[in-house]
Image (cartoon, grey):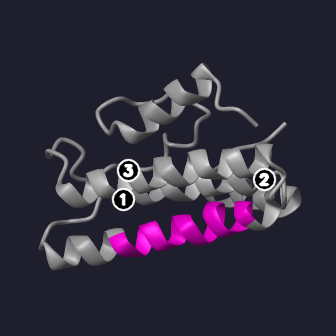
Amino acid sequence: MKLCETQAEKYRELWNPKVRPASGAGLDSHSHSHSHAPQTIPDEIFLNQMINCYHQTNRSYDELKFKEVIKLGFHGMNRAREEYGHNTRRMCVETRDHLYYVCFYLQCHLLYPIMPHTIAHVLNVHFNHQLN
């Protein structure tokens, strides 16, 4: 499960609040508050943790270590999300809803091979995104 260039570009667009992804990516119905404000240190930390979890989870899939996939793709992403909320409160800066959205969206795509029916339901209901 390698990250191809088109996927990398798609996720870069999701992480960049100024660029609106193509329709069908599930972002059209969500408003991005504070999207023009400069990124803060907690934002950068959260993005780096999501990227690390993503790449480590892909590596675990390649090595067929499914316990590590759950550990990194689910628990690692949740830990990063909780740390982001804690860091933004501690530094008195506002959280960015689109970063939470990207985190949940990545979690869904990382865990889809293990729980396809559950993830397909979550993507359909919460992200208005149909999987083929």
Front disc: 3 or 1: 3
- Residue indicated by mark 2: 112
* Residue at numbered disc 3: 47
Residue shown at the point (76%, 59%) measured from the top left: 119
24, 52: nearer the viewer: 52
Q: Secondary structure at mark 3?
A: helix
Above or below residue 21? Residue 89 is below
| Marked residue nearer the N-terminal end (2 or 3) | 3
Q: Earlier in the sequence, mark 3 or mark 1?
A: 3
Majority secondary structure of magenta residues: helix
Q: Are marks 3 and 1 in contact (CB under 8 Å)?
A: no
Q: Is residue 102 visible?
A: no
Q: Earlier in the sequence, mark 2 or mark 1?
A: 1
Q: Residue at x 29, y 78 (%)?
A: 86
Q: Nearer the viewer, residue 128 or 79?
A: 79
Residue segment shown in magenta: 68-83
Q: How many marks?
A: 3
Q: Residues within 10 Å of mark 3 (few under 14, many from 20)?
A: some
Query: SS at mark 1?
Result: helix
Image quarter where the N terminus lies is: top right
Name the amino acid, label 1.
Asp
Which callout, 2 or 1, points to the residue nearer the camera?
Answer: 2
Please give left or right for residue 117 compared with residue 17 in the image: right
Q: Is residue 1 above or below residue 125?
A: above
Q: Which mark is residue 128?
A: none
Residue type at numbered disc 2? Tyr
Kindly give the residue lying farthest to the front in the view shown. 63
Instruction: Identify the mark at residue 97; answer none if there is no mark.
Output: 1
Kindly state the secondary structure of the residue where label 2 is placed: loop
